[in-house]
């Protein structure tokens, strides 16, 4: 098997020329009859498997003359076509839709254009960014309530809240406070000593965001934690408090 092109955009899209399966009539597909699929005149001597996600594998049987033209058109399409049309109405995008776009961009190269478009558009809509910050931090809080780490939700939510308006500020701060308390509690209950993972990364990001939004509220949490009596039965209670103090120095 010889690889003619590793794709320009995404490692999951790979064109294989003359795959080993060419001698297996079943694998050659139902339409194979020795003729080039493009010109239907010359013998098909080039058998191309195009592997792509999520559509799977496609076989093409071409002659030596048609193959370069078809391959050039395919490479052109990889480089210029987003997998999905660019979305409109970014002002109304929900947190779930935004996270979907992130996941698709991570899985499929052409979808990176869609995500970039969404991020560029969001710069124009501060109220949408503020709403997304609240939605994402609320999702993070629910995730921590289920004992699941939520650092990526906290990270994106904190980022969208960096210039949050006065209307949403109190809600934003309240969510960060809940996330910090919940993260420290979960770290204290965890059997391993506190570290970046799990819960430590999200805690660090929430501390930084609260420090930017309202340093006095962060100081109040520090005082409250420092004066709290040691809680028996939590294996890493003291270590979790120390971790917090290291990340949020006075
Ligand atoms: Zn041909």
Image (cartoon, rainbow, N blue to C red):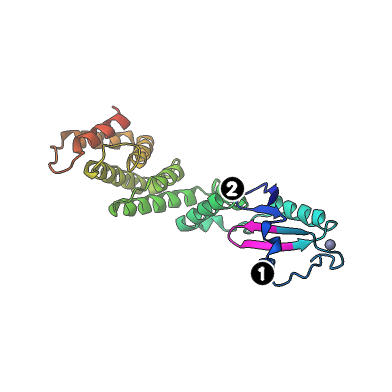
Q: Residues within 10 Å of mark 1 (few under 14, many from 20)?
A: few
Does residue 57 show up magenta in the picture? Answer: yes
Alpha-carbon distance for marks 2 and 1? 42 Å
Quarter location, residue 207: top left
Residue at the image point whose x is 68% and y is 52% from the top: 1
Any atom of ligand 1 within 8 Å of the CB at mark 2? Answer: no
Quarter of the rendering occupied by the C terminus: top left
Q: Main secondary structure of the magenta part?
A: strand
Q: Residues within 10 Å of mark 2 (few under 14, many from 20)?
A: some
| Frontmost residue, 221 versus 233 | 233
In front: label 2 or label 1: 1
- Percent x, y of residue 168: 39, 48
- Percent x, y of residue 51: 64, 57
Q: Is 236 displayed left or right of 90 in the figure?
A: left
- Percent x, y of residue 68: 81, 53
Q: Is 68 displayed left or right of 248 in the figure?
A: right
Quarter location, residue 185: top left
Q: Quick check: can you spot residue 248? A: no
Furthest residue in direction top, as rendered: 250
- Percent x, y of residue 98: 50, 54
Residue at the image point whose x is 26% and y is 37% from the top: 193
- Label 2: which residue? 116
| Circle 2 SS class | helix
Range shown magenta: 49-60
| Frontmost residue, 213 versus 156 | 156
Q: Which mark is residue 26?
A: 1
């Amino acid at each position: 098997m010889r690889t003619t092109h590793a794709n320009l955009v995404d490692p999951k899209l790979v064109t294989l020329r003359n795959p080993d399966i060419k001698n297996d009539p079943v694998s050659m597909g139902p339409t194979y009859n020795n003729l080039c699929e493009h010109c239907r005149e010359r013998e098909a001597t080039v058998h191309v498997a195009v592997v792509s996600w999520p559509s799977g594998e496609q076989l093409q049987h071409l002659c030596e003359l048609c193959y370069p033209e078809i391959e050039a058109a395919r490479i052109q399409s990889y480089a210029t076509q987003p997998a999905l049309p660019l979305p409109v109405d970014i002002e109304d995008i929900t947190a779930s839709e935004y996270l979907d776009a992130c996941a698709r961009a991570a899985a499929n190269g052409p979808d990176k254009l869609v995500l970039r478009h969404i991020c560029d558009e969001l710069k124009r809509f501060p109220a949408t960014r503020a709403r997304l910050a609240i939605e994402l931090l609320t999702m993070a809080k629910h995730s921590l309530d289920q004992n699941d780490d939520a650092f990526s939700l906290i990270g994106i939510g904190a980022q969208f809240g960096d210039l949050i308006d006065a209307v949403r500020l109190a809600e934003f701060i309240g969510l960060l406070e809940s996330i910090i308390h919940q993260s420290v509690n979960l770290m204290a209950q965890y059997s391993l000593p506190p570290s970046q993972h799990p819960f430590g990364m999200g805690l660090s990001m929430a501390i930084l965001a609260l420090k930017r939004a309202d340093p006095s509220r962060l100081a109040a949490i520090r005082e409250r934690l420092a004066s709290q009596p040691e809680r028996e039965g939590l294996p890493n209670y003291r270590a979790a408090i120390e971790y917090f103090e290291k990340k949020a120095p006075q």
